Image: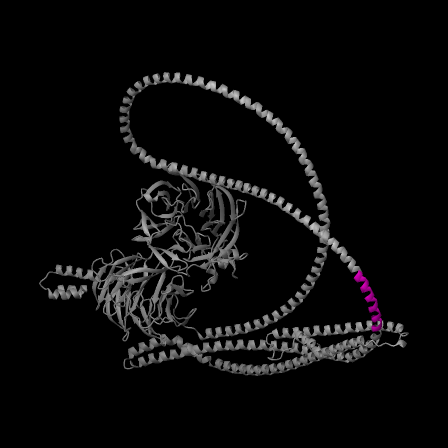
Amino acid sequence: MIQELLWRLGVPGLLRLFRKNTCGSLRCIVIQSREARGTMSTVVAQSLHVFGLRSHVTNNIFFFDEQIVIFPSGNHCVKYNLDQKWQKFIAGSDKSQGMLALSISPNRRYLAISETVQDKPIITIYELSSIPCRKRKVLNNFEFQVQKFTSMAFSPDSKYLLTQTSPPESNLVYWLWEKQKVMAVIKADIQNNPIYQVSINPQDNTQVCITGNGIFKILRFAEGTLKQTNFQRGESPNCLAHSWVSEDRIIVGTDTGKLFLFESGDQRWETNIMVKEPTSSRSLDIIHESESLVEFPPPSSPASSIEQMSTTTYTQQVVLPQVFAIAAYSKGFACSAGPGRVLLFEKVEEKDFYRESREIRIPVDPQSNDPSQSDKQDVLCLCFSPSEETLVASTSKNQLYSITMSLTEISKGEAAHFEYLLYPLHSASITGLATCIRKPLIATCSLDRSVRIWNYESNTLELYKEYQEEAYTVSLHPSGHYIVVGFADKLRLMNLLIDDIRSFKEYSVRGCKECAFSNGGHLFAAVNGNVIHIFTTTNLENINNLKGHTGKIRSLVWNTDDSKLISAGTDGAVYEWNLSTGKRETECVLKVCSYNSVTISPDGKVIFAVGSDQTLKEIADSLILREIPAFDVVYTAITISHSGRMIFVGTSVGTIRAMKYPLPLQREFNEYQAHAGPVTKILLTFDDQFLLTVSEDGCLFTWKVFDKEGRGIKREREVGFAEEVLVTKTDMEEKAQIMLELKTRVEELKMENEYQLRLKDMNYSEKIKELTDKFIQEMESLKTKNQVLKTEKEKQDISHREHLEDLIERQSRELQDLECCNNQKLLLEYEKYQELQLKSQRMQEEYEKQLRDNDETKSQALEELTEFYEAKLQEKTGLLEEAQEDVRQQLREFEETKKQIEEDEDREIQDIKTKYERKLRDEKESNLRLKGETGIMRKKFSSLQKEIEERTNDIELLKTEQVKLQGVIRSLEKDIQGLKREIQERDETIQDKEKRIYDLKKKNQELEKFKFVLDYKIKELKKQIEPRENEIKVMKEQIQEMEDELERFHKQNTQLELNITELLQKLRATDQEMRKEQQKERDLEALVRRFKTDLHNCVSYIQEPRQLKEKIRALFEKYVQRADMVEIAGLNSDLQQEYARQREHLERNLATLKKKVVKEGELHRADYVRIMQENVSLIKEINELRRELKLTRSQIYDLESALKVSKKTRAQEAPESVLTKDVVGTSSTMRLNEQEETGRIIEMQRLEIRRLRDQIQEQEQVPGFHTIAGVRLPSLVDSDVDFEVHTK
């Protein structure tokens, strides 16, 4: 019997020990088993990272420093570093039922957490500066009634704590928390309305503010109680949030979108937050019906302040923005303004009100199934970083957002947008959890209709997608490339692509609550109520259906070699299925228990199950070997390591328990605080290194697993994690096409930029020429001005010299007069001084006499007083003895009253302390004011001293300038004498030059005689140029005709491109229809195959008519609808033939159109080349004409020079000189006019060529028009340069 008991208890070591020591007692064996158990290693789990937020905790986000934020997640507070991305945890209290409110002290040293532990409220204060954070104080003994604390706030010096309890008590408690002493308790509201926020004045410990439903009170702590200092006029609105913006000013927000500014309890300012129109194209009614709003419950609700906000659907009335959060900063304050909006208000200078400066919105989520509704979430908490550089917000959908304030200043005129602080988190209960072997991935699904893929190595979100239906279960393929998700309407098999989760197979399995891939990945099981469907991943068919459960199946698990499947359900049954036969091998039914989770040992011999009966069952061979009690909790999930040495279970209170295997009889396990709700799923990674847990609180925890000595329990991996990802062919082709288009676009932009740069260079060169001309003119004008100013300066110097001489004379006269007057005054003052000296001598003599008399009277009075006081001393000694007796009696009385006084001392000290703190604050302010005034006076004094020094320096400078000017005057006089000499010399040179001019005039008359001959030759040359100009006009007309042809060709090209795009679209549509038809054909073939297999099975019963009849009836029920579909497919065969015929016709048309496009393109190219060649030939001819013109000019110049050299004249030509002068004059004017005309003609030709080039470049930029490589027009600038070089 003892051997059987030990075997059932699962202690094989003890059994061997019992066989050796059969004479020993059972007691000795149990003692030895305990000793053996103590030597085994204990499993330790350390929280590593968390993905989630508890948004219903009051004040759920704040900054510890510039880089670290603190927020609640599960049953922990998380310290998260924004730069380095690490997390540290502050665990909640043991047996905690969840956090309700948080508060951080102003010096960032202490953190207060409000919790309920076993239905009792508790406040724990942690010291954040210590590493790790340690508990400083625990407030759990209350002399007043309290259910829970819903809001808390520290005083500015961090010594006091203000707490608010929930209705119906609604007590406001003022704590001296370090001594765990209650300073004051009052009932904040008699009508049991909920209070949402309490705070203490940031400059005054004794002033507090509370807001709630119809409540706005400012109270002051004095004489051991809190007294209200403001008085409400009329009904107070529903105040949701408030914030102190200065020492005596408070901003209050309401549920109707109003903001009030109170100063010393009196209203100073009010504004309404405007509701902006939604940006979506849908009507307002549709938007309002789907909008999720937050409203406050009736007073009877016992929930906490933010948990009291319940989502409701809004119908038939305008939405008023509710102000749930206000945060003050140096420039003003930020407040929430309805779903998805935060407004920034800045103070107006020299006025007592604020104006709206910026709007910040929650961005639209592209991964959401309804992106227009993704930003419809209320902002519940706002917080600024210590430097006010970052604003962080938490929302009602468990999301954290942040924005840098510098971005809000950049985006003027437009609404700025938040960014995710971490990544998109789950906003509802997580129902599914899965991991894989080849990749470090975690898959989760939730009732928020989303599926998310996390990476537990990098602690990031890889993929996520939202759907129309709720997701109940999820399973990852071992390769990490596929995922099975059970939705409310279907079971979907999906691919995990690089940037998407895409479904490729759907099964009509409704409300699938459990699914699991096999360890090899070739099979997966899915639950439909009480039936398990087995599918293959190769041909995606249903190969088996396992029926046997009478209740819903809650858990599935495969054994190591995928030969068996274990299931457990609400009917209390645990079945082991053989997949080769499709039948049960073992079963264990316990109808009293509803099983939640099941797992199997790595060797496949022992099954572990947990359920509603608060035990962990160890099952083998259809028998329950052992039942380990859960100690007043329900186990909701269980998993065993792949090594088989450790077991982890999740409980209904959100804790995780780590046990070693074999399982202990006593309470020997490590329990860890994790979640704020029941644990729904728990898993270990394939290498037993990480533990994964999810819960109804929407949080995912990752834990690092160690043994007792701190060593990581790690299995050696033969191959590292895979880095391959799935990408569809269409996505790759689209991306390749986009890349090609972008490359072509880049090349086009380069060409455009080069052309623009050339144009800019030409424009800039012209502008530079214009500017140089302007500057030269300005320089010349400035030179003339400078000369004028120099002459004016000389005149002013002369006048200044004369004025100085007059001033010096006046000064000498005034000095003589002042000396005479001062001598007379000094004589009079000296006489007065002698008279006063005589008077002072007389007064000294009189006072010496009086002093002698006073000394005599003083000595007499002293003697009399000593006698009087000696008599009195004797009397007082007697009285002293009596007084000593009275003192002894008073000491006894004092000792009695001392106890009473000590009790009152604390209160008096507190009052005195507050008084002197106020006085000290006033003194500091006055001191600062006086310091400012003294600083101003010092500045004024220093500025006056500087002015005096500057004036003295100016006087010295004037003196030095006077000396310099005198030297300049002397030098100028010398210059005048030198200039006079130069004028005489210049007069002599002018006479010589006049003589030379007379001689040159005679030579000029002789040269004019030769002009007539040259003019005649120029006329003959111009007659030769005229036919060339006519040819140029004809060429211009030809160019115009070519341009018209080009425009016509462009129009034809654009029309052909449009036709091609239409045909391509039709081709794509036909491809899609063809794919659909192919899919239908595959489905029909699969249906026929299944029918054949079922029919083959029926044939085996041909000898048994009854069974054959039943099987045929089942076949009829199963395939009658699909057979109809087959008939419909047969009817559609004619349609398919018609479709094929039309498709062939379209393909022929498309081929002919392509050929036409190719031919017309070749024709256009040939025409374009011909036009370009003609343009080039015309430009060459123009350049040749320019060269000829230049040659003629050079010849004329040579002739003129030759005529200047030859000075041979005849006497008989003298009488003809008068006649030739007139002829020469007329011919010269004619020559000049003809030169101007040729220059104009050439300039016009240049402009025409430029215009033609611009047109060609514009035509090159037209889509579909491409220039032929290698054919380029020569530039005008280059041709001009070549022409000038040739002429030189």
Q: How many numbered badges does the structure rendering display?
A: 0
Q: Is residue 1169 left or right of residue 1022?
A: left
Q: Is residue 254 left or right of residue 1008?
A: left
Q: Is residue 1006 magenta?
A: yes
Please say whether residue 244 is visible from this viewpoint.
Answer: yes
Q: From the image, which quarter does the C terminus lie in? A: bottom right
Quadrant for residue 202, please give it.
Answer: top left
Colouring mode (rainbow / by chain / secondary structure / one colour): one colour
Quadrant for residue 921, please give it.
Answer: top left
Q: From the image, which quarter does the N terminus lie in? A: bottom left
Q: Outermost residue toward the left?
A: 23
Which region shows up in magenta? 988-1007
Please say whether residue 552 is visible from this viewpoint.
Answer: no
Q: Nearer the viewer, residue 580 or 733?
A: 733
Q: Nearer the viewer, residue 1011 or 564?
A: 1011
Spot occupied by residue 676 in the image (x, y as percentages of width and height): 34, 56
Q: Is residue 707 magenta?
A: no
Spot occupied by residue 347 in the image (x, y as percentages of width and height): 52, 48
Position of residue 161 relative to residue 1096, above or below, is above
Spot occupied by residue 845 in the image (x, y as percentages of width and height): 50, 19
- Report the predominant secondary structure element of the magenta stretch: helix
Spot occupied by residue 792 in the image (x, y as percentages of width and height): 72, 51
Q: Is residue 1078 left or right of residue 606?
A: right
Position of residue 702 relative to residue 859, above or below, is below
Position of residue 808 relative to residue 1265, above or below, is above
Position of residue 72 relative to residue 1019, above or below, is above
Q: Nearer the viewer, residue 436 or 1212?
A: 1212
